[in-house]
């Protein structure tokens, strides 16, 4: 399951005075099983780009292929089963009377057996950390974090091979954030689901992404491993972005202790590095 | 997609017509409607058409745009024309069995069609050159004297402003919900009419929920800023009668006088 965008351009409201070019000549390949972090300033074209992955938007020029098939040619139903997109604030799309029905919404549209639907709903609820007794409640009674889980479960229930999440933890408390990001990374590791995570939180991206794509003004500016991307802090800042806070801390530390290693963007790595430096200092003291 | 709908059909620009005071434009649009109504000779029609085209050119709006506005009334124009052609009795031009077409019928049909088309093209200039917010501001000012007979001008204008303000927001919201629901398997394009109508329930419920939530938030925000209605309220942008208004009014007045002269001399 790979997604390939070739010379993809997209213009909103073409041919009117309100015309806006949102994507310019994008070339991108997302491979099976990758965990890609997509970052960029507000209005850089991230959301427009991901909406091309399941055919919600069709390219103005160029093309997008999913698993070798052009998104303009294939059946949308099939495509949307393979590529699941979770939008920002997905809890705003809940509408059924019970949580169960809401998760089952997509499955029922597929014309599956009731028994199969039930099995999948319960399985997905478990993966997403929704307690069994919540299934019969109204989705509007739940807390913000729970609602978000239900909405994501509605997409997960379709068993997509590629999962796109647009700011999945925006506006949640720390517990809700960790819970949701936790089960998403588990899905990626255990089931090999390809994940594309759009986020403004550099900490979240640093923690989970294996590859980072940086967008700026409708173009792909940087595409590389987290260590490469976060090392060039100035370039990120020029685009209105930043590196994880711990990276700034480590850069300051390097000014004091020149032997500090570069390219640290995780708190856990920073901890190891600081421990190493302390150990070294201690040895030096000991030797003298 | 839904985003491609042009709203309130405002066409951004910097022309004299764009700059003119909304009150002046509303008043002149009324004058224009009266003119189109009283014009009766072909010379008059020709002149009104030229005036309308001149105004469109001054506003720098592509003719295509104003013609687009004619689409909804096309059926009415065709219908009115046909009725006039076939029912008005007079000097016959063409006769075949029960079908009789008279000279008077043709004349009236042409005039009616012209009148409708000019009417729509001319009045659409008002909404094409004025932002919805300015338009309601102008309406409020013009309606103010009606307060004496118990019409709550300010409240009506406020309601219109809020409604207009939220049209794009709710359209965006609808677009987003449609996309979100189709991402998890909803299908809006196939099936019978009833099935398709039913498939919009997953869009309508979240839309209503969000509209109520927004209304609630707006009410709270207004409350916390001590909003208390129209009495004694000042504005950041005061409407002023300026040179642009003088120019626009003068040109229209000259045109009106020439037309009246042609009509009644």
Image (cartoon, rainbow, N blue to C red):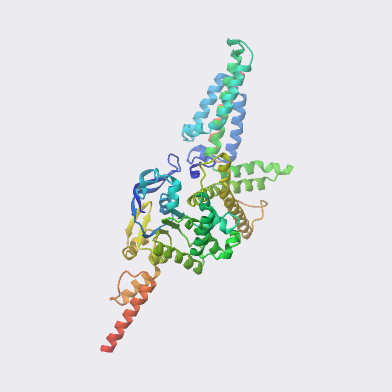
Residue at 46% across / 65% down in the picture?
A183
Residue at 50% across / 29% down in the picture?
B53
Counting from the top left corner in percent of width and height, residue B136 is at: 60, 44
Q: How many marks?
A: 0
Q: Quadrant of the N terminus of chain A?
A: bottom left
Locate residue A12: give its quadrant: top left
Counting from the top left corner in percent of width and height, residue B177 is at: 52, 50
Residue at 31% across / 74% down in the picture?
A255
Counting from the top left corner in percent of width and height, residue B1 is at: 48, 43
A161 over B249 or under it: above or below: below
Counting from the top left corner in percent of width and height, residue A166 is at: 45, 57
Q: Nearer the viewer, residue A130 or B158?
A: A130
- Taking the view exactly as shown, the residue that stands out farthest to the left is A288
Residue A89 in view: no
Residue at 33% across / 58% down in the picture?
A223
Locate residue B218: give its quadrant: bottom right
Q: Nearer the viewer, residue B26 or B110?
A: B110
A173 left or right of A9? right
Locate residue A162: give its quadrant: bottom left
- Taking the view exactly as shown, the residue that stands out farthest to the right is B149
B112 over B232 or under it: above or below: above
Q: Nearer the viewer, residue B212 or B91?
A: B212
Residue B167 in view: yes
Q: Quadrant of the C terminus of chain A?
A: bottom left
């Amino acid at each position: 399951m790979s997604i390939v965008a070739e010379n993809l351009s997209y213009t909103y409201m073409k041919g009117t005075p309100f015309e806006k070019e949102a994507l310019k000549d994008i070339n991108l390949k997302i491979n099976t099983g990758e965990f890609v972090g997509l970052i960029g300033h507000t209005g850089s074209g991230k959301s427009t780009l991901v909406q091309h992955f399941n055919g919600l938007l069709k390219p103005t020029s160029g093309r997008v292929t999913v698993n070798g098939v052009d998104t303009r040619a294939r059946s949308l139903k099939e495509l949307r089963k393979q590529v699941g997109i979770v939008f920002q604030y997905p809890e705003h799309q809940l509408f059924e009377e019970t949580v169960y029905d809401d998760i089952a919404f997509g499955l029922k549209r597929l014309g599956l057996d009731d028994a199969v639907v039930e099995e999948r709903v319960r399985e997905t609820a478990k993966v997403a950390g929704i307690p069994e007794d919540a299934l019969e409640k109204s989705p509007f009674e739940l807390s913000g974090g729970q609602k978000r889980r239900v909405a994501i479960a509605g997409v997960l229930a379709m068993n997509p091979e590629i999962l796109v999440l647009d700011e999945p933890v925006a506006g949640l408390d720390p517990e809700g954030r960790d819970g949701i990001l936790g089960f998403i990374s588990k899905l990626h590791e255990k089931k090999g689901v390809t994940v594309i995570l759009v986020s403004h939180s550099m900490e979240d991206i640093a923690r989970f992404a294996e590859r980072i794509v940086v967008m700026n003004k409708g173009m792909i500016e940087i595409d590389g491993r987290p260590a490469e991307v976060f090392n060039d802090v100035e370039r990120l800042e020029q685009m209105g972005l930043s590196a994880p806070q711990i990276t700034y801390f480590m850069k300051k530390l390097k000014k004091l202790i020149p032997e500090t290693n570069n390219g640290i963007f995780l708190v856990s790595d920073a901890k190891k590095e600081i421990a190493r430096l302390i150990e070294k200092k201690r040895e030096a003291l000991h030797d003298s | 997609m839904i985003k491609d709908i042009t709203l309130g059909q405002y066409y951004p620009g910097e022309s004299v017509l764009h700059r003119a005071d909304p009150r002046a434009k509303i008043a002149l649009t009324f004058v224009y409607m009266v003119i189109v109504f009283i014009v009766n000779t072909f010379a008059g029609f020709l002149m009104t058409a030229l005036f309308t085209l001149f105004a469109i050119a001054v506003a720098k709006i592509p003719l295509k745009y104003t013609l687009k506005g004619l689409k909804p009334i096309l059926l009415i124009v065709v219908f009115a024309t046909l009725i006039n052609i076939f029912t008005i009795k007079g000097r016959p031009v063409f006769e075949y069995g029960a079908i009789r077409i008279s000279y008077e019928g043709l004349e009236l049909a042409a005039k009616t069609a012209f009148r409708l088309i000019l009417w729509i093209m001319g009045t659409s200039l008002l909404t094409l050159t004025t932002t919805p917010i300015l338009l309601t501001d102008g309406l409020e000012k013009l309606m103010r004297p009606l307060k004496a007979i118990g019409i709550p001008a300010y409240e009506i204008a406020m309601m219109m402003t809020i409604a207009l303000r939220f049209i794009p927001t709710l359209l965006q919201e609808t677009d987003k919900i449609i996309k979100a629901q189709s991402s998890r398997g909803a299908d809006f394009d196939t099936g019978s009419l009833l099935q398709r109508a039913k498939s919009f329930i997953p869009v309508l419920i979240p839309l209503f929920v969000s509209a109520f939530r927004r209304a609630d938030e707006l009410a709270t925000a207004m409350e916390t800023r001590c909003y208390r209605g129209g009495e004694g309220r000042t504005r950041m942008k005061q409407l002023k009668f300026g040179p642009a208004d003088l120019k626009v009014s003068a040109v229209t007045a000259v045109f009106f006088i020439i037309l009246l002269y042609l009509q009644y001399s």
